[in-house]
Image (spheres, rainbow, N blue to C red):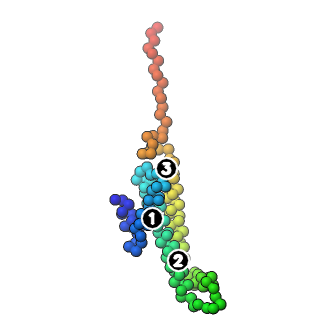
Amino acid sequence: MRHGLLARCLRLDTESRECFDDLLALHLKRFQLADGVEFSMIEEMVASCWRMRRAWAIETRMMDDQIAAQPVRKDSDGLARITTAFSQLANSPSLALIHRCEARLHLMYQRALHNLLLLQTADVPNERTQSRFRTIQRPARAPFVSS
């Protein structure tokens, strides 16, 4: 099954198969696909979305770890600890890498969505309709008239 291969290529062993399947199912339900080309666009969208969610989880873990490393002071609140943690992460290449990755994945998702919508509105026949071309009716022949 093609979808099983997609899951094996994208999903890490520590990630939920059920959540991945749900994400794919949501995309398939939203877009009524006509063929394998349109399914390829959905694969790109799901891959980008899944990896973007992973990047968000990584960023959250990086922030949580950095916040936990901050000393607890009586005069500082949670926001001060978050600000200090963010400032320290901003000085490392890790946060910039995650943000570049997010931007690239968002662009990939948007491009695949755009291409899918173009395919779905193109004036070509597909499995959704018999034909999107107008049928031209031939005029009836005039009866043979002898003079």
Q: In the drawing, does residue 5 fall left or right of residue 105? A: left
Residue 61 in sight here = yes
Q: Which residue is the site of mark 3?
A: 120
Residue at 56% in and 88% down: 70
- Whether tag 3 and tag 1 are in contact, CB under 8 A, the answer is no
Which numbered disc flags the more N-terminal residue, 3 or 1? 1
**Which image quarter is the N terminus in?**
bottom left
Q: SS for tag 3?
A: helix
Count residues near mark 1 (Cα–Cα under 10 Å), then give few for <14, some for 14-19, many for 20+: many
Residue 127: x %, y % from top left: 42, 45
Q: SS for tag 2?
A: helix
Residue 63: x %, y % from top left: 54, 80
Which three-letter amino acid code belongs to the residue tagged 1? Ala
Q: Which residue is the site of mark 1?
A: 47
Which numbered disc flags the more N-terminal residue, 1 or 2? 1
Which numbered disc flags the more N-terminal residue, 3 or 2? 2
Badge nearest the viewer, 1 or 2: 2
Q: In the drawing, does residue 69 fall left or right of residue 25? A: right
Vertical placement of 18 versus 95: above or below?
Answer: above
Q: Which residue is the site of mark 2?
A: 60
Vertical placement of 57 versus 37: above or below?
Answer: below
Residue extending farthest to the top is 147
Q: How far apart are labels 1 and 2 at the CA level?
A: 20 Å
